[in-house]
């Protein structure tokens, strides 16, 4: 279970990074992703802002969750834990009130969209971290 859980989370973070960069660079995907970046910059972001996105964006980013589950034939419990973790983490990463250990570096992405696309370790790996 733990091995599958780690594989699912790492694979998801890698896929999310690639998909998110693609949504910032593809002329076909930018119009869908712009909905996620439209918010009032005068207010601090909250978890509600995480869910603001187009259905195309949601499908594209969630592929990175389902592919490893199918390939690993992960059980329901492992898949549920992984999905819950990814969902809660995604919500908290968009909330200025979340604790620092959650990885609030993604909040910087919303004011500097060329940085902090995914989880901190993945952004470090690809050289796109901004503190």
Image (cartoon, grey):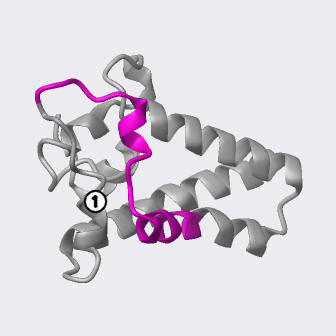
In the rendered view, does 15 fall on the left or right side of 26? right
* Residue assigned mark 1: 126
Residue 90 magenta-drawn?
no
Please identify the dominant SS of the magenta region.
helix
The residue at 48%/64% (across/down) is 61
Q: Residue 130: tell me if it is visible.
A: yes
x and y, in percent, of residue 49 in the image: 35, 38
- 80 or 6, nearer to the observer: 80
In magenta, the rendered stretch is 42-64
| Left-right relation of 23 to 66 | left
**As drawn, 117 above or below 103:** below
Q: Element at badge 1?
A: helix
- Identify the image quadrant of the C terminus: top left
**Residue at the location (47% across, 36% down)?**
91
Quadrant assignment, res 98: top left
Residue 27 in picture, x, y percent from top left: 19, 82
x and y percent of residue 47 in the render?
42, 31
Residue 93 at least partly seen: no
Q: Residue at x 22, y 24 (%)?
A: 44
60 shown above or below 53: below
Foreground residue, 113 or 101? 113
């Amino acid at each position: 279970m733990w091995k599958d859980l780690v594989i699912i989370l790492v694979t998801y973070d890698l896929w999310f990074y690639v998909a998110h960069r693609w949504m910032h660079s593809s002329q076909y995907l930018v119009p869908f992703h712009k909905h996620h970046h439209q918010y009032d910059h005068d207010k601090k972001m909250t978890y509600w802002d995480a869910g603001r996105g187009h259905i195309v964006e949601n499908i594209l980013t969630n592929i990175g969750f389902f592919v490893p589950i199918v390939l690993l034939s992960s059980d329901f419990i492992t898949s549920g834990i992984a999905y819950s973790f990814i969902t809660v983490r995604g919500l908290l990463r968009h909330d200025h009130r979340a604790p620092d250990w959650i990885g609030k570096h993604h909040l910087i992405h919303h004011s500097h969209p060329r940085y902090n696309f995914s989880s901190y370790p993945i952004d470090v790996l690809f050289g796109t971290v901004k503190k």
